[in-house]
Image (cartoon, rainbow, N blue to C red):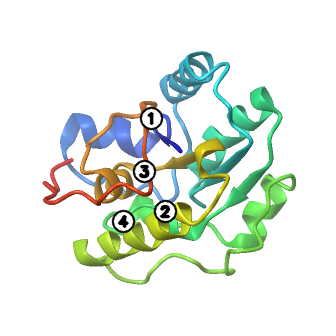
Amino acid sequence: MILLRHGESEFNRHFSATKRDPGIRDPALTERGRMQVEAAVSALAGAPIRRILVSPYTRALETAATLAGQFGVPVAVHPLVRERFAFICDIGSRRSELERRWPEHDFSELSEVWWPDAAEPHDDVIGRAARFRAEMAANTEAEHCLVVSHWGFILALTGQSVPNGAWLHCDPAAPPPAELVWKP
């Protein structure tokens, strides 16, 4: 499968400059973020993508919508691939609001309020990543999936820290990373 970190969000832009939480709830992509997504579309042209799995956060949904438009594939929202709940940007939007904004996406796996109400320990994210890895290892179509996710989840799944708009291949049958460094 291919893992893609969403394009730069308003949170990423401010946090990169200040290393402080700017207090932006469920932020959208910046113009730079939209350009990063367009670059990913170009880089992934010709990839055998048949389905997109996406985190329920706005920044990831915006990223997935652009990719789906270019590749002509369905998008399913998958709550396991969401970001680690650590900042105000990790307070999401209700399912009903997201369904109004992206009616073409499949939200059937999502609860109305789907984000945690407190900071999520690293071990919880690692556990989510392990569950997703096992799910995808059992999926015969995994090699044709593009997963739009976040820094913390991709780190927990692969052990790699990737910048906004970057992508990498991941074999879900491969062993999980031995050690993680949680520094954004």
Local SS, label 1: loop
How much space separates mark 3 and mark 2, taking CA atoms?
7 Å
Residue 37: image x %, image y %?
57, 27
How much space separates mark 1 and mark 2, taking CA atoms?
16 Å
Asked if the residue under mark 1 is in contact with the one under mark 3, i.e. CB atoms within 8 Å, the reply is no
User: The residue under label 2 is which amino acid type?
Assistant: Arg
Asked if the residue under mark 2 is in contact with the one under mark 4, i.e. CB atoms within 8 Å, the reply is no
Residue 121: image x %, image y %?
25, 77
Looking at the image, tell me whether mark 1 or mark 4 is earlier in sequence order. Answer: 1
Asked if the residue under mark 2 is in contact with the one under mark 1, i.e. CB atoms within 8 Å, the reply is no
User: The residue under label 4 is which amino acid type?
Assistant: Arg
**Vertical placement of residue 125 versus 5, above or below:** below
**Vertical placement of residue 29 versus 38, above or below:** below
Looking at the image, tell me whether mark 3 or mark 2 is earlier in sequence order. Answer: 2
Asked if the residue under mark 4 is in contact with the one under mark 3, i.e. CB atoms within 8 Å, the reply is yes
Which residue is depicted at the point 60% across and 21% down?
Answer: 38
How much space separates mark 3 and mark 1, taking CA atoms?
10 Å
Q: Which residue position is annotated with label 1?
A: 8
Local SS, label 2: loop
Residue 6: image x %, image y %?
50, 40
Residue 84 disc label: 4
User: The residue under label 1 is which amino acid type?
Assistant: Glu
